[in-house]
Structure formats: C-alpha cells, structure tokens
Image (spheres, rainbow, N blue to C red):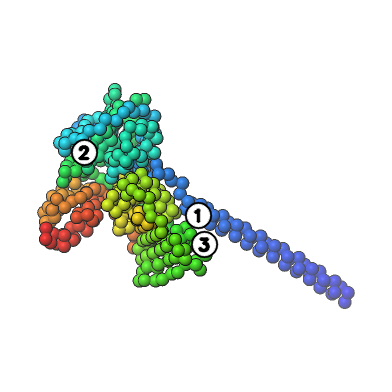
Amino acid sequence: MKFNSFVMRVILITSIVLSIILSWKIWTNNTHYERRTDSQTTTKTVSRKSDRKISDIFLPTQILWRTNQQSQLVYNSKESLVPKLKEAMKLAKSARFKASKLSEANYYQAITTDDTLTLLYPDNISYAVFKKVFDDSNNQLSRNTTFNRIKITMGTKPQLTLMNDKSHMIYQTTMRQFSVAQVKRILDHSDVHLNVKESLLNHKPFIYVAANQSLLPYSYLVNQQPENYYITTLLDQKNTDNIDAKEQGDNVIYTDGDNNDLYKRLTINHKTGEIAYVKYEDTKSPTGLTKSFETSFETSFEALLKTGNSLSGMRFYSYDEDTNSTTYRTYVEGFPVFYQTNFGSVKVQLLPTGQRVDFSNYSLQVPVPAGDKPVTLPSTQAVLNQMTKNGLLLENIDNIQVGYEWTQETSNDQVIDLNPTYFIQYKGVWRSLSALLAQKEELTEGS
C-alpha cells in the first residue's frame, strides 16, 4: 500500500514537472513568435518611410548621346547612369550664363549639334531645382528660369547649355574642371543604345525612334499598403473611431472634419487601387504660389513623400501651371510607365486653400523573370503614318513617346506586366497606340 502511494506521488510530481516544462516551452515559443512578428512589422513600417530627396526625384530621365551625325538614347540595364553623370557635373565650375532666344531653325540646329551629351527632362524644371540636383553654385540665373534640356558640348572647352523647347530660350556657359574623359568612361558602361533622331512636330522637337529598335518587357511584384496606414498618415488619426466612413460603389470615403480649421477626405477605390486625398485649410496659400515653380515643386514633393509609397524609379514628369499641378511617374529603363493610374503615378494639385493628391495603392517592388522576348518597335515615323492613314490629324498631337504599359496579370493580381509600346497625347489625353486607333472614329468626329 505504501509502495502504491509512493508510485502515485512520483507519477504526480513527474506530471507536474512535465506540465511546467511544456508550458514554459509554449510560452517561450509564443514570445519568440510574437517578437519575430513585431520585428517584421516594424521593418515593414520603416520601409514605408522614404529617405528620398528632391534631388532623387527631379533627376533627368533620359540620356541622349550624339556623335558622327547619329543620336542614341543610352542606358545601362543594371544601374542608372544619370546619378554618375550628375556626380561628374558636380565637380565642374561654370562661368556667367549668357541668355539667348533662338529662332525655331536655329534652336533645332543647336539641339542636333555633334559630339554632345544631353540630359533630358520630360517637362520644364526650374533653375532652383537644378541647383539642388546638381549642387550648382552659380547664382547668375533667376531661380524661376525654366528649361528641359541640359546639353554638354564636348571638346577642349566644354560648354553647358540649358535649353527650353517651348520658348527656344537657351542659357549658355563654359565649364571648368569638367572631365570629358570621365563622362565618356561612364557612357562606355551603357549596354543599350537606341538609334533615334530629333524631329520637329507641331513646332516642338520630339525624339523619333528609328526602325527595328527593341526593348525588353518586364514583370514586377507589386506592393500594396493597408487602408489603416493611409488613415494614420494622411488623416493623422491613430484611432479609426474618429473617422467617418461611407461606401459609394467601389469607393470608400473617409473624412475627418472635427477640426474647424482643417478638413480632410480620403477616397480609396477597391477595384482600381486609386486613392484621392484632399486637404482643405482656412488659411489661404501664400500670395504668388502659382507663380513660384520652386515653391510648387517643393510642396508637391512633400505631398509625394507623405503618401508613404515606394518612390523607387519615381521621377518628375510634368507641371501644369494653369492648375498648379505636378505629375510624377514611375520610370523603367528611362521610359515612363502608363496606366498605373489615369493621371500618372502621382498627381499633386496645389489649391488656393489646400491640396489634392491622386495616387495608386500599388507600387512596383521586386522584378521577376518575364521570360518574354524583346519587343521590336516600329519607327516613330511609321506610327505617325499609321495615324494619318486612320484619319487622325497630326496637328492634334501634343506628345508622342515610347513607354511601358502597366497591365495586371489575370492569373496573379500581385504581378504586373510592363510591355513597351507607343503612347500618344492626342487632344490633351494620353492613350496607347492601340487604344488611340480603337477610338479613331470618336476622335475624328468634327475634325
């Protein structure tokens, strides 16, 4: 009897010890799991805070190299050459700029000079932004002077020319301590060369791609932020109970109007991923805001940062002075991405008493193998001939360029395909070539 009692006690003690050990294991494993999850969440949150500067977003988008009477768009498929060229230009010193207004013929001759390197912007930037991007110390030009070309004439006495395609104004200076050899070494690392020529269309110079030029298609995994993130960052509300939410079709509209001096509205489209953020304030914008390119660009850049989305590959694309709107697009291999949204990647409009930001919840994250063969593009002239044959008027073309079409895969909504094609801004609206030809009857009515 005593023996049985002893055995029972041993079994009981063993069970208790075993229970304690198992419980400890479970507790410590849960703690480890939670710590790992918290760590991952923290890392993800930190990654949303972009460290991009205005000098990163307002970089030129294309490099045009002209020699032996042939122009080429050049880039490196593994790394961008623009930052390296920027560093080379930082070392140069320039003299006083000389301003000139050229005739259309003389301006065209100036942009097609041999032995020149041109860094191209898709639209005019201000000299104030140029100084920030290139750390230029020259103060001879007005900060609101605008241009879209940075041309460097190679030779024993290199020259820097800032050029405005719209006004035909040029600002020219000589460059000291500028290494032509260093620039040529950078260009030697370019592994893609597209033969192009600059031609005038509707009195504006455009880059015409020659026949049989090929570009690679790409596929990317996309990143998507949770809605609560935008409520926290844009509406400045950590407690969603203070936010009014209303559904309208595919849209959910969040508003925060408790503050009498401030009204914010956030609209998220669950179908397209497009987001519209509007902030109204009683305080009016500073006088002359719409006339200051520097202020407009800086304010729009701050709004771009506040979206919290990845800005990898994001570049300044255009500025509309009439509406005080700045548009940014994602760029791949020096070419803009279209259809990520209807308005570009991000559009920031500065209102008299606030601002509106339109952007996408989706951003390119990780490239994945596309497995597709290079796409051979028709020449730009062939595209224009095709448009004319279909009854479209060339005089209605505002812009034409090669870009990447954003298409979501039907089998995987987390993968985006980017296919190169032509995009035409016709009567003020951007369309792909195929979409433009599909709408030709509607667009040619009354022409």
Looking at the image, is mark 1 or mark 2 earlier in the sequence? 1
In the rendered structure, the answer to whether residue 335 lies left or right of residue 168 reads right
Q: Is residue 44 above or below residue 79?
A: below
Q: Which mark is residue 168?
A: 2
The relative height of residue 79 versus residue 338 in the rendered view (above or below) is above
Percent coordinates x, y for residue 246 in the rendering: 41, 71
First in residue order: circle 3 vs circle 2: 2
Q: Position of residue 106 (x, y in %)?
A: 17, 34
Circle 1: residue type: Lys
Secondary structure state at the residue bearing disc 1: helix
Is residue 366 visible in the rendered image? The answer is no
Q: Is residue 107 left or right of residue 358?
A: left
Label of residue 44 in the image: 1
Question: In the rendered view, does 35 fall on the left or right side of 131?
Answer: right
Task: Decide if residue 353 is in sight here.
Answer: yes
Front position in the image: 383 or 304: 304
* Residue at 19 percent of width and 46 percent of height: 380
Q: CA distance from mark 3 to mark 2?
A: 51 Å
Quadrant of residue 190 within the rendered picture? top left
Residue identifier under label 3: 238
Q: Mark 3: give few (<14), some (14-19) or many (20+) Cα within 10 Å.
A: few
